[in-house]
Every structure is written in C-alpha cells, then in structure tokens.
Amino acid sequence: MGTPPVPTRAFWELCAADDAYDEFVGQAKQLGVMSGGHHNRNYVLPLTEAMGRRVGREPGTNVIVRIRRPEALPVVIRTWEHEMEVLAAIGRVLPEVPKCLAQRSDSAVHSYVEGVPLSKVCANGKPVDSMVIGALAGLFAQMSQVRREALPPLPEGWPSNDKDSQAFLRTLAHLADRQIRQPNWSAFGGLFAALGIPEDALPRLAERVSSMARRPYSLLHTDLHRDNVIVTHRGDPPLISVDWELATYGDPLHDLATHLVRMQYPEFQWGEVIEAWYAAIQVTRPMAANGLARDLPHYVAFERAQSVYPDVMRAARSLEHSLDQQSLDQATASVSRALSAAAEPLRLTRVPDEAEVERVLLRWQASRHDRRPGGRRAATALGWKPNERVPEHPDFPRSAVVDALIAEGTASAGRVFKGTAHLNSVVRVPGIGFPVMVRRKVASVCRRERGYLSEHAVLRVIERSGVAVTAPRVLALGESHTRDPFAIHTYVGSIDGDQPPSHPVNGLLPHEADGLVDQLCALTEVDYVSVDPTAMYWDRGGYFYEWLSEQLVRLVAGLPKESQRLARVFGLPDAYRLGEILSRHRVTPREPALLHGDLNPWNLVRRSDELALTIIDWEMALVGDPLYDLVRHMHLTPTRPGIRDRMFRRWAKRLPKTHTKDWERDWQVYRWIEIVRSAYVDLDRLVTGADLDAPNVRRAVDSYGMTLEAATASLGLPVRSTANPRLAWALPHGHHGSTRRVGFPGGM
C-alpha cells in the first residue's frame, strides 16, 4: 500500500465551505423567519461571514433557505428534479427571479426578493386589482420567450413536436397518474375508492382529450398563485414570480389554467384575466393564443381533476393528530369542494354529500389513530351499537366487529367495491379464518326501484333453511356511533380476499345456467312467510302481476318532472295511461316463492364447485311468482337463445306444476313489463346521472335506443321519429350540470 495523498488546499477549502453551508442551514432553522407551502420550509435570514464567502455575497445580505419537507406527500408533477437548473436557465430572460446561490439534495440557498407576497396584500378569493392582473399577464408574456434550448434536458417521453397541444395534455394526465396517484395509492387508494374515484380516472381522462389547436411550447411556471407572486417594494418591476420547482415546458394555456384555478379569483374576474393574458401574449408570441376559447377549458378541467388527489390526501392527513369536530368539518368541506370540482372532468357520476364524506374520513382516520402508539382505541373512535335483530353469530363473535371496523378504514383500493347503493370493504379479522365484507348503504343514493324485504332477514332465513342456495351469511348488523348503519357478511370472492370477484358479464356458461336454475328452484323451499307474513294471505288469483304493474305505475308517477317530460317526448305514456295498458294482461296464478329480484350479472359471483355461482346483493328480494325471477334475469343478462331454452327446460322439469303452470305463455308478459320498466328507469338515469358508475347500469343506458324502440312497440305505441335518445345526454347529469363557465375575449 502506498502513502495516502496529502489533502490539497482546495480540498480543505471545499470542506470549510461545506461546514459553512451546514452551519448556516442549522442557523436558519433556529433563527430564520419561517414561511412556506406544502413542499418546502423557507427561512429568511442574513448571510454570515463564512456563508457570504461561500456564495460570493456581502455578509448581512438577506437570503432565503429552502428546505424540503421530508413528510410532504408526493402530490405534484415535477419535470426537473432541481429548481437550481431552472433558475440558472431562465436568468437572462427573467433577470429578477431568485438566484440559486448554493444547493444540497434537500435544501438550497436563494437570493431574497424584497417585497411581500400578493396573498398578504389581497387574500384568496378577493378581487385582484386590474393593474396587478396586467402585471401578471406581463409575467406570462415574458415566460413565453424562453425556448427549449435554454432549459435543462426534458424527461424521456416528452412530446417531440413543440406545438402538439394534445400530446402535451395527455402527457400531463399520465404524469399526474404516475407521479401523484400511483405513489400514494397503497396508502390512500381505499379512501379514494370509498369516495367514488376509480383507479383509472386520470388515464381515462387522457384518452378522452379531443383534438386541439397547435401552439408553440414555452417555459411554464405552473404554480403561480398569490403566495408565489411577490409585490416588490421598489415597484420596478411591480411583481416577481418565485418558487419555480414545478416549472415545465409545454403549452402556455396550461399555465393560464393553473393560474386561474390556484389564484382563486372571484368567478367574475376570470374573463378579465383571460383578456389580459391574451393582450400580453399577442405582443411576445401571438401563436400561443391559438384556439384559446376552445382549448382553455380542457386545461381547467385537467387542473381540477388532478387537484382532487392532493386536496383529499392533505385533508385526510390533517386529521392525523386531531379528530375533533372542527378539524373534521374543515377536512370534510375541503374534500367535498375537491370532489365537486373534479366531478365533471373525471366523469364521477355521483358526488357523495358532506355527511357521507365525513363518515368516510372518520372511518379512514380513526383506524389509523388506533394503530399508532398512544392512539385512542377504535372502540371509542369507531364505537358501534349492535342491532339485536341479528344475534351474535357462532362463527363471528361481537368482539370481532371492532377489529372489522378498524380494518375497514385501512382497506386497500383493491378491496373496496362501490355498487349502486352500497360501499363494500373486504377485510381480514384476527382470529377469523375467512375474509369478511363490511357493507354500508350509500346514504345519498336515491333508488327508483325500491326494496321490499330486509336483506339481513332474507339471508338469515336462507341460512337457517339449509337449502342449496349459495348466498353470503350475515355475521353482524349494527350502527356506528355516527349513526352509520353497517352489516358484516361473509365474503364470496377469493379465499384470501385479494382478488376481485368474477362475474358472468357476457352471459352464463351452460354449467352456470344449470347451477343458477337449481338455486332458483331451491329458493321455492324457503319459508317465505317468515320474511313476508303478508304473503300468506294471497288469494293466488294472479295477484303478483297486478301488484307488479301497480308498483311500476307508482314508479313512473314518482319520476322527476324532467324525466317525465322527456318520456313524453320519446312517446312513452304517462302513469295513468301506462296503468290502463298494463291492466290488459293477465297471468296464471302460481305458487309464490322467495325471489332475489335483481339477478343481473354483477350479482352473480363465479365459483369453482358444482353450484357454479354465488348469489349476492339480496336487497331487492321479494315474494312472488318464481317465473318472474328467471325472466328478469334473462332481461338483465345477455342470454343466448340456446342458454335461455336450456334454463327454461331445466326449471320447468325440476319444479312442480304449482310453480310452472302456463309458463310458456306468461314468460313473455314478464319480459314485456321488464322492457317497459327499463324504458322509464334507464331514461331517468340518463337525465339524473344516477348510478351511471355501476357497470350494469352503464350497459343498460348504452343500449337505450333499442330499449325505447322495444318498449314503445310492445306497448302498441308508434315510435316517434323525432325522438332521439341521444338528446338525453345533453341534459345535466347530477353534479355534471355545475360545470363552471369561463369568460373569453369577444370575437374568439
């Protein structure tokens, strides 16, 4: 081994410089005046002598020390890792922006811009002075002069065409998914699923981007809000933009859109801001305003869509150390605003009301309080009151309920399933050898087709009967301390609960058709009087069809006025006339039985044994003609003629004549009434946007034109040639009707 090299003078100077930097950053944390946002802590203090020598500035000169928050969530899109590279590149065009004097991986020292943030002069939500708006537009015009060659290298996969606006917006959507949603999905995915935000919302947004005008790319700030705009003391220039760590290179309209949203202008000022931007950009780069009126809403929509992720996560994190009512109210309001703003761009068909949002946040956060050292027990945060109508199950003691509620709040997105009326979370409970499902009704859902029996009562009588019907078992029923009812069922998906259930969405296979028929036949052996005592008084004179017709007439009479108006436009009769038409038909009296009432494919779960299918979601159960359950299934599920004939033959062979008499004639009557029902119910869904996130509903409304034609024909009514079902899409869909309209300069 040779003699170690003697350290050079330059080496010792470098060590001294590093020591000076570390000492100065330490002083900043202790003595500096702190401010900052979600990503950094900023400390203002004068340079020491050692640090002054280190950065080549006079001691005593104010600088700002920026230190990354290690606890900050990854909730922003970053094009470049280091802000220093951006500041160095833009200094010639924008000489007033801060200079990066020194930098480490987690901190940096910048020159200090003398002045006050615009937020101190004019708070969020307040109108901004017209002179300030003009100066802000001037900042955008300056940025438009920075070209690609001056900037650091762009990431791989960036659009190669510097004018392709559509490619840039798609890139943004994919980056938001990759940099914001994906890193946080394991921790927050269950929360987003409970709030109704699907995993693929951002990629789907990217796919929907329509053709856009071509605009030359330029430098974008992308975070120009009131805290990042400094009003200078000397007034020349009047404003300086700071905090460039989220800068990027792309379509200038993206910068305008993020500015409009994040500045929180009053709505009446949007037009003024857009006009000022348009006037300023005409001087420096007029092509940047191409297609402004048509394309700006795309970027506004994207900004609101991607903002739902940081807004929800920050609100949830704000409850980590306090679950008092004030903190919960603030977090609930923040999440509700974010969901309402994102509803249209993310195609959220239903936005939960504030009460539902509060319950979701409380369950999610209370579970985490329980799991932290010193955190309060979930028995307090997630207390529950048992419903004595369901006694303690021998396979699931009541002591396990609290553990199930704790696990519900921490369930991953892949274990949270949201149906049309229920939020279902699949969880594992210590000491229980099988996964269970915590099932809660979505309180803000208004279903047109009502249930008639208690789901828990139906499932309990099926379990007690011992018949060969595969349905979930009810393990517990109760109410959270927030008066939020829940049920706990056995889970019928994969044994470990990690795989979502498989449904026969394209129709039943032969052995599945046999298995379903066998279970429907077994249902006729269940004591239906124990769940519906009124059924014992039936006169067996065809009452069920009369009752079914009456329920449909009531449903039509209770539709909203807009749905009824559009039904008339499409040639559907009003409730009174519908009742007259329905009364023309009769069916043969048959022995009643317990029916499922909603055998669509998503209520059938494939299994690997001879029973083939498990039947779930019994909330629409009723007592009635067993033929109706089979025919309604065929209406709701794609059924090939061969499978239909197979099911009818097996069903008629296995049941006695008391259940099947004249079925060959009457099944068409039930098919007809279900087509008519769908014509009204699906039209109402199109008008109101209700339940459109459910796959069975989406499939139904997608084929509404054929449904309408079949319904009017079966009613013996003419099809109106002017009645175009696509007109329904022009109507407001729930929260979609609240899309913000922005002002644009005249003549564009």
Image (tube, helix red, strand yellow):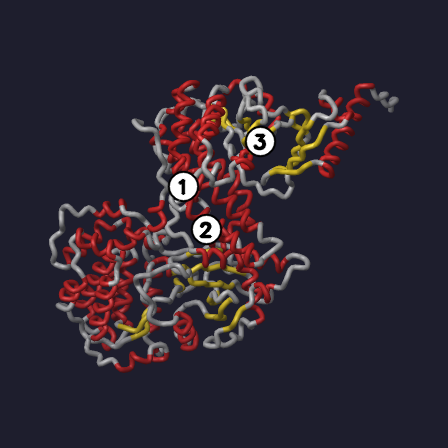
Residue 243's disc is 3
Front of the two marks 1 and 3: 3
Q: Secondary structure at mark 1?
A: helix
Residue under label 1, please give it.
Answer: 204
The structure residue drawn at horizontal position 71% and vertical position 38%, both measured from the top left corner, is: 29
Left/right of residue 251 with respect to residue 15 in the rendered view: left
The structure residue drawn at horizontal position 38% and vertical position 38%, both measured from the top left corner, is: 268
Residue 554 vs residue 662, the one in the foreground? 554
Q: Secondary structure at mark 2?
A: helix
Label 1 Cα neighbours within 10 Å, binned few <14 / some 14-19 / many ≥20: some
In the displayed structure, 91 sits above or below 368; it is above
Q: Position of residue 210 (x, y in %)?
A: 35, 34
Please tell me which of labels 1 and 2 falls first in the chain: 1
The structure residue drawn at horizontal position 56% and vertical position 23%, both measured from the top left corner, is: 152
Residue 229 vs residue 53, the one in the foreground? 229
Q: Is any atom of residue 84 visible in this view?
A: yes
Q: Is any atom of residue 520 visible in this view?
A: no
User: Spatial distance from mark 3 to mark 2, Cα to Cα?
Assistant: 28 Å
Front of the two marks 1 and 2: 2
Name the amino acid type tagged 2: Ser
Residue 336's disc is 2
